Image (cartoon, rainbow, N blue to C red):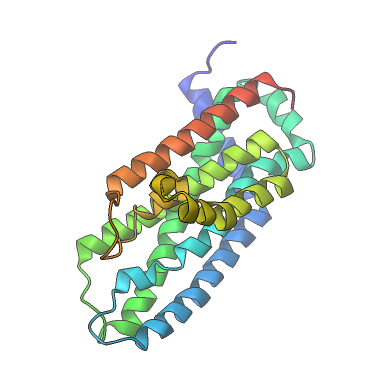
């Protein structure tokens, strides 16, 4: 099968953006994630205000909710990938766009284009709230450090979303994909960190945390933000490539 022209690729990308924009569950998920961020940030900030003045890190507190918010972005990626299978619309998509690999690649790109600004906004809102509440009692925050941390948080949430979309494509069913990924991120991964500490930094979620969170003072053998980004990207690319391969080989 021939490769589509650049104009056709642009049209495919636009079509994928339009499809994602019309999925109400995606926007409801993002709204719910934002509300959850507000609640959790307020709780973490309240606890921080009770600590000793001058020793609280605004970035650490403002981004502490990311570990919980990733559940919303996991669901986002799965819904984006599995929505067309639910009602059988995937057959119409493949009849209209026969280039399966290109179509799935553009779906992931469209999902990233939506996720990056939303993830940055949600992360920034948490840091801004914490700064407003703790600016007189917490350790000073440098602008460059804040921008790097917010970019890292947005990048991590975007990679998590794309990884989840790849898993959703492989499984084709929403509920099993959600159970699998939430079970890994919130149950299996924490257990592996405790029982197999030598591999914890190579897990996608743990490596990704170094993209935005400063390591604890007594933590050893930590990754740099670039190393954490690299490991997270490798995991995501492997799963996306696997999803594309299976997507091209099997029936809808």
Position of the C terminus, as image quadrant, is: top right
- In this rendering, the answer to whether 243 lies above or below 119 is above
Q: Is residue 13 left or right of residue 24?
A: left
Taking depth in this image into account, of 245 and 192 the one nearest to the observer is: 192
Number of callouts: 0
Q: Image height check: is 15 above or below 160?
A: above
Occupied quadrant, residue 55: bottom left
Quadrant (top left/top right/bottom left/bottom right) for the N terminus = top right
**Can you say whether 239 is above or below 245 in the image?**
below
Q: Is residue 203 visible?
A: yes
Q: As displayed, is residue 84 above or below residue 3?
A: below
* Residue for point 29% across, 78% down: 56
What percent of the width, then of the height, locates residue 123? 41, 64
Q: Is residue 210 left or right of residue 34?
A: left
Taking the view exactly as shown, the residue that stands out farthest to the front is 195
x and y percentages locating residue 169 in the rendered image: 64, 36
Quick one: which residue is furthest to the right in this view? 87
Residue drawn 69% across the image and 37% down it: 171
Q: Where is residue 5 drawn, in percent x and y?
A: 49, 18
**Which of the 4 quarters of the picture holds residue 51?**
bottom left
Relative horizontal placement of residue 92, taking residue 29 as reference (left or right): right
Spot occupied by residue 21 in the image (x, y as percentages of width and height)? 60, 49
**Residue visible at 60% across and 66% down?**
32
Name the residue at 52% across, 64% down: 68
Does any portion of residue 103 appear in the rendered image? no
Farthest residue to the top: give it.
1
């Amino acid at each position: 099968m021939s490769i589509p022209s650049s104009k056709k690729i642009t049209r495919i990308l636009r079509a994928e953006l339009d499809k994602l924009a019309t999925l109400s569950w995606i926007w409801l998920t993002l709204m719910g994630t934002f509300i959850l961020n507000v609640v959790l940030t307020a709780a973490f900030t309240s606890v921080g205000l009770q600590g000793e003045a001058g020793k609280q890190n605004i970035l650490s507190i403002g981004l502490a909710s990311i570990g919980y918010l990733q559940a919303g972005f996991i669901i986002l990626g799965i819904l984006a990938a599995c929505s067309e299978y639910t009602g059988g619309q995937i057959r119409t998509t493949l009849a209209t766009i026969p280039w399966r690999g290109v179509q799935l690649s553009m779906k992931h790109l469209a999902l990233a284009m939506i996720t990056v600004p939303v993830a940055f906004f949600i992360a920034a809102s948490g840091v801004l709230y914490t700064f407003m509440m703790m600016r007189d009692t917490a350790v000073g925050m440098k602008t460059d450090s804040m921008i790097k941390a917010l970019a890292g948080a947005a990048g991590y949430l975007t990679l998590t979303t794309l990884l989840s979309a790849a898993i959703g494509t492989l499984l084709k069913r929403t509920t099993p994909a959600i159970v699998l990924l939430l079970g890994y991120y919130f149950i299996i991964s924490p257990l592996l960190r405790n029982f197999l500490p030598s591999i914890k930094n190579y897990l996608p979620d743990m490596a990704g945390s170094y993209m935005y969170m400063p390591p604890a003072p007594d933590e050893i053998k930590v990754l740099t933000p670039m190393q954490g980004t690299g490991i997270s990207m490798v995991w995501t690319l492997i799963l996306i490539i696997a999803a594309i391969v299976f997507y091209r080989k099997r029936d809808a």
